[in-house]
Amino acid sequence: MGEATSISWCNHTFNPWWICTEVSPGCDHCYARDLAARWGYDWGHGVPRRTFGDKHWNEPLKWNAKAAKAGVMAKVFCASMADIFDEEAPAGELKKLWVLIDKTPNLIWQLLTKRPNGYMTKVPLVFLNHPRVWKGITAEDGDRLRKRWPLVETLPGIRWISYEPALGPLPAAWHMKPDWIVVGGESGHGFRLMQSKWAYDCRQMCEDFGIKFFMKQMSARTPAEGKLAIPVDLQIQEFPA
């Protein structure tokens, strides 16, 4: 969590808690799990989630004030070290998040999950319709996209896909039409290779269907090397309106 973030498609990251449980192949080389381990925290089913106090929860209020002063809308990715619809989420923390979102009118909250059923079971109706709440899913390949996207495709507002880490191609004939797709190859030790064709095909689908396209990185040892490896004609970083 921090005011500064290395994630190129947001201005800040906020975690209502840490720790999650793996649910699909995209979790195999989880950077959040590795980072938590370096801080001495376990990961997975049955592990108590790490929670935070008032100082942590007050940080987005400061970001909101700075954004208001600058006359901009700042983007907050929630959550980089957890899944907001984790079945073992700490009691009451998700409700605190909805209150925080309501208190920060100059922040856009980019929600992201591998458990999209939570949008209909854990989100108050007012936030499903909230223009500052972008509803996203992670899909590392076509199988995961077909399973997860139907649970968000009819929701109002900005709906988006994090195609990260890209481990397989997305469907060639696309009828799903999100508002935004972020594409990224895997990084870290033993990273799995994303074929450049998958990224080019995704970019073409975005052009064909009017979807905003954001190329984050290619597969590489580090995120920085992955960014440098992006071909010139894939260096596109668009945002939905």
Image (spheres, rainbow, N blue to C red):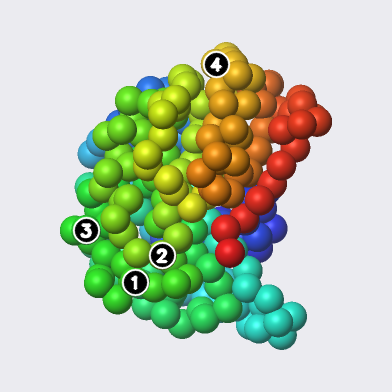
Q: Position of residue 91 (x, y in %)?
A: 24, 62
Residue at x 66%, y 51% (from the top left corner)? 238
- Residue type at numbered disc 3: Met
- Residue type at numbered disc 4: Arg
Identify the residue position indicated by label 3 in the image: 120
Find numbered disc 2 in the image and state the secondary structure of the residue it sits on: loop
Residue contact at pointers 4 and 2, CB within 8 angstroms:
no
Tell which tag, 4 or 3, sits nearer the viewer: 3
Q: Which mark is residue 129?
A: 1
Residue at x 44%, y 48% (from the top left corner)? 178
As displayed, is residue 174 above or below residue 195? below
Count of numbered marks:
4
Tell which tag, 2 or 3, sits nearer the viewer: 2
- Calculate the distance from the C-alpha at mark 1 to the C-alpha at mark 4: 37 Å
Pointer 1: residues within 10 angstroms few (<14), some, or many (20+)? some
Location of residue 23 (image quadrant): top left
Tell which tag, 4 or 2, sits nearer the viewer: 2
The first of marks 4 and 3 along the sequence is 3
Location of residue 143 (image quadrant): top left
Pointer 2: residues within 10 angstroms few (<14), some, or many (20+)? some
- Calculate the distance from the C-alpha at mark 4 to the C-alpha at mark 2: 33 Å
As displayed, is residue 99 above or below residue 239? below
Find numbered disc 4 in the image and state the secondary structure of the residue it sits on: loop
Between 43 and 114, the one lying in front of the other is: 114
Q: Which mark is residue 192?
A: 4
Find numbered disc 3 in the image and state the secondary structure of the residue it sits on: helix
Q: Is residue 81 left or right of residue 153?
A: right
